[in-house]
Every structure is written in C-alpha cells, then in structure tokens.
Image (cartoon, grey):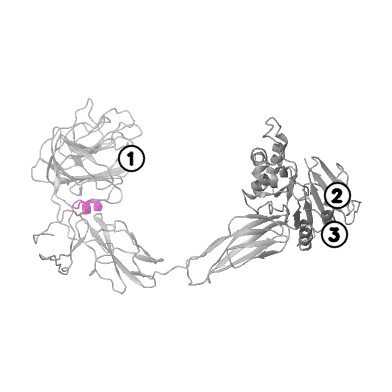
C-alpha cells in the first residue's frame, strides 16, 4: 500500500484514458470502500525540437528507397518543416542545372552522377545561401534533368523567429509556401516524374548521396532548429497546409513520415506515421521546439454509426474522422436511450484506433444503444455521435449432418451406418433424424431409421444411395452415403501348405501362389482339411500355413483333415484357428469339429469326416451325434441354398465308393434335405462330378453336385 496521499502513475500511454479509485487500509488491514472514480488522459509530449550546428550535424533515414512500407520515394509530394534559421549554414548543390548553393532542410538526394539512374535526386527542400529564399528541386526519371524553383521572400538569420516551410509538386506544378503563404505564382514545369526509386539517402538538415555521404561534392548543413518534419505522398492544398501547420499531426492518410522530434534525448528519431525512423548524427542538440498553440478544439462527432446484431455480439462501424490529430475513439453503450458519457466507455482506458468495434459483452434478446466519440492527440473529446442500436439474439444454426463413410456388404448381410447429426439446441429440444433410400435395386430395412447410427439390410445386389436427414423444426439438412451390396463370395481349397518344417527345401511356391490369388478375391475363405502338412503341428501351422494363407485367417472358416488329426485331438489345428486352448471359435467346437454358418443367401455345413481312430470311429454313423446334429441343422436352415464341406469326399474318381462308405449316413442326410453342393479335398486334385443321388447314381433333378479341391 501507499504511505502517502500523493501518487504519480508512470506506466501510462499518452492519449489513452485511465480511471482511478482509492481505498484506505488501517493497521489491522481493514479496507475502506472505494472512493469516487476519477479519470485522466495524459497528453502526448510536445514542445521539443532539434538544433543543428551547420557544420556536421544531421538526421539520416538511410536509403528508404521506393514506395513500399519502408520507402520515402514519391512521384508527387508535399514536404513540410518548422525551422528557425540561427546561422548561415553550409550550402551544397543539387546537380547540373539545379541549385548551386542550397542549404538543406528536408531532402532525399543531392548532386551525384547526373546520369539518369536511381542515384539521381528524388526531392530537395532548402534555403538559397545567396538569396535567403526557399528553394526546391528534383531530378526526373526521363533524363535526370533538374527542375529547380525559388521563393520570393528572403528569410533572415534570427535566434527568435520560427518559420514554416512547405513545398508541393502535383506532377506538373511546383508550389512553395512560407508560413502558409504561397510564394509567388505556381511554377508550372510540365509533366515530369521525380526519381521516386532513388537510392540516395533521405535526411533532415543535410543532403546525402547513394552511399550516405557527399562524395566529391561539398556536403551542405543547416544551421538552426527544426521541428515537425513531414513528408506526404501527394500535393496538399493551400488550405490543408494552412490548417495543419500549427498542429502536430501524428498520422493521416498519405503521410509517409512524420518526425515530431519530441524524443528530447538520445540519437533515435522516430516517425509516428509508418516505421521509417532516423538516427541523429554528430550529436545535434535537443532543445525546445516550435511552440505549437494549445489545441482546445475537439474533433467533430463521428458520423454514420451502424450496429449489426449477432449471437452474443454486436458489430459496430462508423466513418473515420478527417481531423489529422484524431488518435482514437471511445464507444459508449446503454440499454436505454439516450446514451451518455457518465459511465466509462466499453473499450475501457484504451482508445479504439480504427472506426470499427465488436462488442462481445452483450446479452442476447436485449436492445443495446451505442454512441461513439472521437479523441484527438491533445485529449480533446468530441460530442457523441448519433445513436445506433441492435438486439443480439441466438441464431438458429442449421444442424450438422454427416451420413458417415460409404460401406459395402453382401445380400442378406448388413451394413453398419455410422452417421452423426448435431444441432445448436435451437429451437430447444427439437432434432428429428431419419434415414431414407434415394436409390437402389432392392428393398432396404433399417434397424432404427430414427437413429444416426444403425444398421441396414438389403434384398438385392447393387449400389444403394442412402440419405440421412436432420431437421430442427426450422432448418432441414441432409447428407448422403452409398452402400455397395454384392452377392456373397466363398473361395478356398484343401491340402494347402507343404511340410516346410521337416523338409525346409520343399517348394512353398504353390501355397504362396494360391495365397496370392486370395489377395485379389474378397469374401469368405474356406479350407478343406490337411491345411498344414505333414501332421498339423503348431510349428507346421506357424511356419508353413501362416506364412501363406495365414494372412487371410480373419476371414477363414476351416475344415479339419486326417493329417490335422495326426497331432492328437488336432490341437495344432484348433489352437491355430480357435486360439490356444479355446473350446469354441471359427473352427467350431474342438470336441466335435462340425459346425454351420450362413453366408448371404447360402447355408454352409462343415462336417468332420475323420470317423476313424484319429477322432471318433462312430462319428459318422447313423444316429451318431454328428448325424443327428446335421439333420437338425438342415431342417432349421433359413434357406434352401446349402453347401456341405468335409475333408474326405463321399464319392470321387480317386477311390472306390466302398473306401468312404462310412460317410454314407451323412451323405444320405445331405441328399434327404436337398443339399446343392458338396466340397471335399484329400485327393490332392481337382474334379467336378455330375449331380448324384444317395447311392451315387446320376440324378440331374435332385442330385448333389460334388467337387474335389485338394490342390
């Protein structure tokens, strides 16, 4: 806490308003209520200038070439400065055909090459050493020709009298002003363009060449005081010069550089318009500058204030004031009219620099009234503008709908629809969602058509276009996705991987070749037994089968074979497909080896043909568990399209019918229930047999088509 009733705040910015309150604290740290609020706006520092000795002191801005943001190059221009001529100074020349004895005030160049290139002079404002009159010159970009002009009034040396110098060039005509008065008639010289791309250095109090010196020429120096130096990119009018000469203009349209020389110490000379700063050379003296008359005239109230409502905000805009010394604006708000300045502005203590503002501290559904005031560099505040009002409100944004990624499935399968629909809650509690079919070859059934995330089934193959729609009672939005529906694919073979464990030299090429074929075929993969020779061990599955067909394991429904059962209980087979020790899995129940599944519009039964001492000698007999299961499963089949798979085929050209006669009860059941296809392996060849009845006789009407695919 402060121990004195006097406090000076040094952490402020000139031109910004600050608001203060004070409280008292006793020795027990009890704090009083705040005092009445007061405010203050610190003035911009003014009144300083720079004194030059006429021999070696000046300010340089470097090349500042061209017309970019750091350039002082101009084609048309106004040069201004306040000066007090306290000594003769030292003249220089502006070039052949130019001014032979010019004392520099504000310059960008001097005599150097006279060679029509960018080392020619852009502009020069100074005083003739012989006549004491204002002079100005530039070299044009056509031939490097000089175009000097001179004033009519001699300026005596004085330690007390300040003068204002200004010169304008509008593309054809010079105008020189002394103390705001036009010196003689305008000087029409013709249509010439000054050397705006000059790389000669810009300066105050001297003139410099392209290297920042004077070369073989005599370097000129001004002897006296300078203040409020300005360079504009256009020719200002006589009225503008007269109205602005007694003001410190910090920034304005077209003001390329303005050096108020108010630093009062150091070597840095800053511009308040653009960042083209200078360096004082030779230690010129900081001193009192031109005594600008106090500005007590406030700016005009801003005009054209508008207020546009939004959701939780109001956007405001108005026309910028034209006074050159306006540094910002204060914005006032109320929920009643008229708006007053009694309360602090909503922008707080920091002026709004540009004629626009977004008020985000509003309350929706309440009308807010606004008025704006302009503030100049001297702290003068305008009256309030005409009011503008707006009522912010919650905008009903449309729902955001995404039907999700495109999908693919098979007939009688289903597609998972992962759509989403969100809303901003306006109107409250309303968001209706619906899936519909825009096109497709068949019927579509949605599990829940009112849920963005659901499933759909399809009756026919083809491409369906589905649409997810959401409406919030006011706005409806839709998004589409496609589902490609195909007939199911079932692909596979038997007797697959050779024994690469006990015979490392065995060729794996056939297994790799058939696995490569599977890479290009979508659908469900089946095996027909003897998948990993020679004994279906875990090592043979891992090293031989898994390295080939194993990459399709996730979509494989297998059949066991006799070589799989050469490992007791076919543990290598079941552990590989079901997972280590798992009773159930893609290979069915490891105690049985038979199972069924549906694939699209087909029903598939997988049988265990190893009804020998390897598994169960009676496992295929009439009345056996497998035979009873098979008949019950076929009776419950959802479709008449049925495929049976087993390792040993009941009939083939590779064996007599008697060899696999123990399979007859199962074959009989297959025939009894109208099974369409039988797939087997074992014989390591491929053949297709004509449809056969229960006795193995031809039956083209109701027979079972049998394939051997033990390749």
Question: What residue lies at 81% left-to-right and 40% top-to-bottom?
Answer: 685
* Occupied quadrant, residue 91: top left
Left or right: where 184 falls relative to 505: left
* Residue 249: image location, x then y, percent: 23, 51
| Sequence-wise first label, 2 or 3 | 2
Q: Looking at the image, which is closer to me, 387 or 644?
A: 644
Question: What residue lies at 91% left-to-right and 51% top-to-bottom?
Answer: 698
- Which mark lies nearer to you, 1 or 2? 2
Whether residue 560 is situated above or below residue 295 in the rendered picture: above
Task: Give the residue at mark 2.
Answer: 661
Q: Residues within 10 Å of mark 1 (few under 14, many from 20)?
A: few
Quadrant location of the N terminus in the rendered image: bottom left
Task: Give the residue at mark 1.
Answer: 190
In this view, the residue farthest toward the top is 216
Q: Residues within 10 Å of mark 2 (few under 14, many from 20)?
A: few
State the SS at label 1: loop
- Which mark lies nearer to you, 2 or 3? 2
State the SS at label 2: helix
In this view, the residue farthest toward the bottom is 336
- Which mark lies nearer to you, 1 or 3? 3
* Occupied quadrant, residue 469: bottom right
Question: What residue lies at 27% left-to-right and 42% top-to-bottom?
Answer: 276
Q: Residues within 10 Å of mark 3 (few under 14, many from 20)?
A: some
Task: Give the residue at mark 3.
Answer: 672
Magenta stretch, residue numbers: 238-249
Asked whether residue 293 is in view, the answer is yes
| Sequence-wise first label, 1 or 3 | 1
Whether residue 40 is situated above or below residue 611 in the rendered picture: below
Q: Is residue 226 part of the magenta span, yes or no?
A: no
């Amino acid at each position: 806490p402060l121990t004195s009733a006097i406090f000076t705040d040094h952490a402020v910015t000139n031109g910004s308003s600050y608001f203060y309150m004070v409280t008292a604290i006793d020795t027990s740290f009890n704090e009083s209520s705040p005092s009445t609020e007061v405010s203050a706006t610190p003035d911009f520092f003014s009144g300083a200038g720079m004194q030059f000795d006429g021999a070696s002191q000046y300010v340089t801005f470097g090349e500042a070439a061209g017309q970019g943001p750091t350039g002082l190059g101009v084609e048309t221009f106004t040069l201004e400065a306040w000066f007090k001529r306290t000594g003769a100074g030292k003249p220089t020349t502006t070039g052949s055909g130019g001014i032979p004895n010019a004392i520099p005030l504000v310059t960008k160049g001097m005599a150097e090459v006279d060679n029509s290139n960018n080392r020619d002079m852009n502009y020069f404002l100074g005083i003739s050493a012989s006549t004491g009159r204002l002079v100005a010159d530039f070299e044009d970009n056509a031939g490097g020709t000089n175009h000097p002009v001179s004033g009519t009034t001699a300026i005596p040396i004085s330690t007390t009298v300040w003068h204002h110098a200004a010169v304008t060039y509008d593309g054809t005509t010079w105008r020189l002003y002394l103390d705001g008065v036009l010196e003689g008639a305008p000087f029409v010289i013709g249509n010439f363009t000054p050397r705006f791309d000059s790389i000669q250095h810009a300066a105050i109090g001297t003139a410099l060449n392209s290297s920042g010196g004077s070369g073989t020429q005599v370097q000129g120096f001004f002897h006296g005081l300078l203040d409020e130096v300005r360079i504009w990119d256009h020719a200002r009018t006589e009225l503008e010069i007269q109205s602005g000469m007694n003001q410190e203009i910090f920034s304005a349209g077209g003001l390329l550089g303005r050096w108020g020389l108010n630093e009062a110490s150091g070597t840095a000379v800053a511009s308040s318009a653009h960042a083209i700063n200078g360096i004082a050379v030779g230690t010129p003296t900081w001193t009192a500058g031109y005594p600008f008359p106090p500005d007590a005239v406030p700016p005009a109230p801003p005009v054209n204030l508008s207020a546009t409502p939004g959701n939780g905000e109001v956007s405001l805009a108005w026309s910028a004031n034209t006074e050159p010394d306006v540094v910002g604006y204060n914005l006032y708000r109320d929920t009643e009219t008229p708006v007053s300045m009694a309360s602090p502005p909503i922008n707080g203590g920091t002026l709004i620099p540009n004629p626009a503002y977004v008020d985000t501290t509003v309350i929706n559904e309440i009308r807010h009234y606004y008025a704006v005031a302009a503030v100049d560099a001297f702290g003068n505040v305008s009256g309030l503008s005409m009011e503008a009002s707006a009522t912010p409100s919650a905008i009903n944004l449309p729902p955001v709908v995404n039907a999700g990624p495109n999908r693919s499935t098979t007939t009688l399968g289903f597609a998972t629809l992962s759509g989403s629909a969100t809303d901003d809650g306006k109107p409250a509690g309303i968001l209706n969602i619906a899936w519909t079919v825009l096109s497709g070859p068949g019927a579509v059934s949605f599990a829940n058509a009112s849920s963005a995330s659901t499933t759909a089934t399809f009756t026919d193959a083809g491409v369906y276009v589905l649409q997810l729609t959401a409406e919030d009672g006011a706005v409806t939005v839709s998004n589409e996705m496609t589902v490609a529906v195909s007939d199911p694919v079932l692909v596979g073979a038997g007797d697959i991987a050779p024994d690469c464990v006990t015979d490392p030299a065995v060729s794996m090429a056939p297994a790799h070749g058939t696995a490569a074929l599977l890479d290009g075929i979508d659908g469900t993969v089946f095996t027909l037994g003897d998948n990993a020779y020679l004994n279906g061990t875990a090592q043979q599955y891992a090293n031989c089968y898994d390295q080939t067909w194993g990459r399709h394991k996730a979509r494989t429904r297998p059949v066991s074979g006799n070589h799989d059962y050469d490992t007791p209980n076919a543990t290598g087979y079941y552990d590989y497909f079901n997972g280590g020790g798992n009773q159930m899995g893609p290979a069915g129940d490891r105690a049985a080896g038979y199972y069924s599944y549906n694939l699209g519009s087909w029903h598939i039964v997988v049988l265990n043909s190893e009804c020998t001492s390897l598994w169960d000698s009676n496992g295929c007999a009439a009345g056996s568990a497998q035979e009873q299961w098979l008949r019950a499963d076929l009776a419950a089949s959802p479709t008449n399209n049925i495929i049976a798979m087993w390792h040993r085929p009941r009939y083939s050209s590779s064996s007599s019918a008697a060899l696999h006669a123990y399979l007859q009860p199962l074959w009989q059941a297959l025939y009894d229930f109208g099974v369409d296809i039988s797939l087997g392996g074992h014989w390591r060849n491929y053949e297709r047999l004509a449809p056969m009845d229960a006795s193995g006789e031809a039956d083209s009407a109701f027979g079972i088509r049998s394939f051997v695919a033990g390749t």
